[in-house]
Every structure is written in C-alpha cells, then in structure tokens.
Image: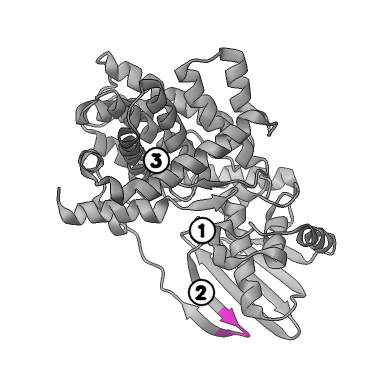
C-alpha cells in the first residue's frame, strides 16, 4: 500500500493508543495542575481552575483515580498539585501517597481551589492558575488531554503554541484526514507485525487486566458482573460484559491503567475488549487478533475526527462501531461487509447522549456493543439499512461524515442543556465567573 498512508496510520496508532490512569478528564486536570505547580516553584497558596463545559461534565461525577474515593474538579486539581508528577502525563497520579491524599483533603476543606466555567473555548480546555509567596503561574491545556498550549510565570509567557485550526467538516485535521474504511482494511492486512506488536500488545494486556478486575470485584453498578450473572456464558454476553466491567472499575476509582482511544479509556476498552473476546471464541491466531484490533481502533478514530474529542455524542457508539467492524472482519467480512456493519450500528445507536463520566458509562458501553453485534448479525444475513433512511447515505464514508456533523454541530445545544442541568442540580461553585 501507499507508504505515506502506511506510516501515517502507524503514527496515528502510536499517538492515540497510550496508557492513562483513570478517567482522562480528571487526569488532564491533575496533569495541568501538577505542571503549574512545577512552574510556580514555591508553595502555592491558592489555585483557580478554568474549565470548558465538557471538562466539567466529565469530571463532576467520576471518582478521581488513586484518590481514596474523592470526586470532582477541585479534588482532581488539588491532588495534581500535591502529589502529581506531570512527567508521567496521563499517569500523573500514579505515585500519589497516603500523605498526599491527606493533604489534598485538608486543602479541599480550606477552599484552596476555586473553579470557573470558561466559555467561548474549545470543548477540551483547562487553565490552572496558582499563586504563592508573591509569585504566579498559569498552564493552559487545549484540544488534547496533555496538549499544553501556554505557560506563564509571574505574567511572563514561557511557552505559547498557536492553536491549529482544524477542518473537522472534511476531517482534514493532521494525519487523520487520510483515514477511510477501505485503506484501514488494507493497512490492517498489510501492516508488519513488528510495527504494531508493542502498541497493540500493550492494549490487550492492560485493558484485559482492568476488565478482569471489574468482573472480580465490586465497582459502581457492576454492569459487567450483572450481565454475566443474569444472561449466562455466551459470546454475545461476554463481549458486552468484558467491556462494561472495565468501565465499572475505571469509573469508580480503580487505579489500574488502560490504553485509551480518541482520548478516552472507555472508548479504548470498547474498541478492544469485545474484539479480544470474539478472537478467543473463534480461536484465531494472535496475529489475526492484533490485525482485527487495528481495524477497530482506526475505524473508531476515523469517526471521532468528525465528532471531536468531547461532545454530547457518546463516544462508546463510535468505539463500538470499530469493534463491530473488527468482529465482521474476523468472520471473513470484506470491505462491503464491514461497511454494512458500521452503517447498521450508526443507524441504530448514533446520537446517544453523553452526560458525563460516571457509572452508567458501563451500561452505555454494553448497549453500544450489543448494537454492534446486532449490526454484524444483520449484515451476515444480507440486511443493511438503506440510503435515505434517516442519516444513512449512499456509502459508509458519507454516513460517517453526516453522523459526525450531527455530533459536532447538531448536538451543541444538547451539550449546553445537559451541562446547565448538571450544574444547576449539583449546586456547584463552577457557576462563578
């Protein structure tokens, strides 16, 4: 295949499939806070945190990893200041100690941190400002969870990166503009194993481990455990349960890392765990499983390039589309078959709302994976939703693009409505400007 596409797809996988400890939004907050603490260089006396609505939505209800059960924006940011290691990026809270947790609780009680809703910025935006001993520091993260775009100390700009304007309508944002279903399948079949063994192997190992933890122990609503207990040991149930169990654990404070996709651990688990389960059921080789995971991950990323990192569109759906595409490919499906599975999944579940990171994400993952399995089953019996039926277009690329437009543009008012309801009912201090 074309060498530019080959190398670009490899780079996308290596950029996207990285480890993260816990939900990525509180981790991004902790990362920015830890970085600001390092820039300040003295003991901080107060912190102001400015967040976009989508960051607030995804941090408000989730347990901060390695925190001993703490929740919320203030807890994530304070723990980053007290015990975070910014050099570890999305594993910034890995080395937090009991003493750090105790100090964080003390600062929470002292109103050390003030949170603000920042409007008119990108969906993924965090600015942490610290003051102490007459000095100040500021770190701004935008577009990516560890994407620092500005650093200041005592009002002096130490680093500033001009934000890249993305053409998300056409998907031509950096390398991801080259993604399409046909080339993804060609790449998955042609890629050299030595080029993907490390990145995909790490995903298999880490995501399987947290899924097993979620099935063994009590986390949240125990969606994964409940599925297995209620419906039995069937591949269609196991595929849903394994993915849901990983989210059960991750959304409820488990400190084990996961490999993310499109900036999300939940999406990373949804992309991978059902595919791993089907590969085991079909008794395929490790190589074929790895290639199927390439299909799943890239199909999910392909959809997210239109939707954006954070929106009102539940990312479990795009991730499940990837899993469904890979399950179809594992069963011998060609480009047309994979395209029909993607179309069937989008036509069924496209537009499920995201109302923040929390325990019910596991249930949404289970539902999305169920839709993807149904989509494959329909395709395998020559059934596919037809152009003109809702948002289904003449081909899979146009269908993906239109659904992405709905998620990015059409659901913006939905996003605002969800955020306002969450803030007003939670009595949060983030209404302060």
Front tag of 2 and 1: 1
Residue at image x 67%, y 29%?
221
Compare marks 2 and 1 and give the one earlier in the sequence. 1
Range covered by the magenta-colored residues: 152-156
* Looking at the image, residue 261 lies above or below residue 144: above
Q: What is the distance, in whole Å, between disc 3 and disc 1 at their CAs?
A: 23 Å
Task: State the image coordinates of residue 237 (x, y, percent, origin top left).
Answer: 50, 19
Q: Farthest residue to the left: give it.
A: 2
How crowded pointer 2 is (Cα within 10 Å; few <14, some 14-19, many 20+) is rated as some
Q: Which residue appears at 63% of the width and 75% of the height?
A: 38
Element on which disc 3 rests: helix
Q: Is residue 401 above or below residue 229?
A: below
The Cα atoms of the two marked residues, 2 and 1, are separated by 14 Å
Of 178 and 219, nearer the camera is 219
Q: Is residue 110 left or right of residue 345?
A: right
Q: Can residue 393 be seen?
A: yes
Front residue (pair 44, 164):
44
> Which residue is painted at 51% across and 57% down in the image?
124
- Residue labelled with disc 3: 406
Q: Which residue is mark 1?
A: 145
């Amino acid at each position: 295949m074309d060498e530019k596409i080959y190398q670009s797809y490899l780079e996308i996988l290596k950029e996207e499939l990285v480890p993260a400890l816990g939900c990525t939004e509180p981790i991004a907050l902790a990362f920015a806070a830890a970085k600001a603490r390092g820039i300040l260089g003295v003991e901080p006396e107060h912190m102001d945190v400015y967040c976009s609505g989508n960051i607030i939505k995804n941090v408000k209800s989730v347990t901060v990893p390695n925190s001993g059960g703490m929740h919320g924006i203030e807890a994530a940011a304070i723990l980053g200041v007290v015990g975070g290691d910014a050099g570890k990026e999305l594993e910034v809270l890995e080395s937090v100690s009991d003493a750090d947790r105790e100090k964080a609780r003390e600062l929470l009680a002292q109103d050390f941190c003030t949170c603000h809703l920042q409007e008119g910025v990108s969906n993924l935006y965090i600015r942490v400002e610290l003051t102490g001993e007459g000095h100040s520091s500021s770190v701004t993260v935008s577009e990516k969870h560890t994407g620092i775009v500005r650093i200041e100390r005592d009002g002096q700009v130490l680093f500033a990166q001009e934000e890249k304007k993305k053409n998300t309508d056409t998907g031509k944002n950096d390398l991801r503009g080259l993604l399409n279903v046909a080339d993804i399948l060609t790449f998955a079949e042609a890629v050299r194993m030595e080029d993907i063994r490390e990145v995909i192997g790490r995903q298999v190992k880490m995501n399987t481990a947290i899924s097993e933890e979620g099935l063994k122990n009590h986390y949240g609503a125990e969606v994964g455990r409940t599925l297995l207990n209620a419906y039995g040991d069937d591949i269609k149930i196991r595929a849903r349960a394994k993915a849901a169990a990983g989210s059960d654990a991750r959304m409820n404070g488990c400190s084990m890392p996961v490999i993310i996709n499109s900036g999300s651990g939940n999406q990373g688990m949804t992309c991978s765990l059902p595919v791993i389960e089907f590969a085991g059921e079909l008794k395929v080789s490790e190589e074929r499983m790895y290639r199927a995971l390439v299909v799943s991950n890239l199909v999910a990323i392909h959809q997210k390039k239109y939707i954006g990192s954070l929106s009102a569109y539940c990312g479990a759906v795009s991730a499940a589309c990837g899993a469904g595409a890979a399950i179809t490919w594992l069963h011998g499906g060609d480009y047309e078959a994979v395209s029909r599975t993607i179309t069937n999944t989008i036509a069924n579940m496209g537009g499920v709302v995201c109302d923040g990171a929390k325990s019910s994400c596991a249930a949404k993952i289970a539902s999305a994976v169920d839709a993807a399995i149904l989509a494959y089953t329909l395709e395998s019996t020559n059934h596919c939703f037809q152009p003109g039926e809702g948002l289904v277009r003449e081909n899979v690329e146009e269908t993906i693009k239109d659904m992405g437009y709905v998620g990015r543009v059409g659901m913006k008012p939905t996003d605002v409505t969800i955020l306002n309801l969450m803030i007003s009912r939670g009595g949060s201090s983030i209404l302060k400007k």
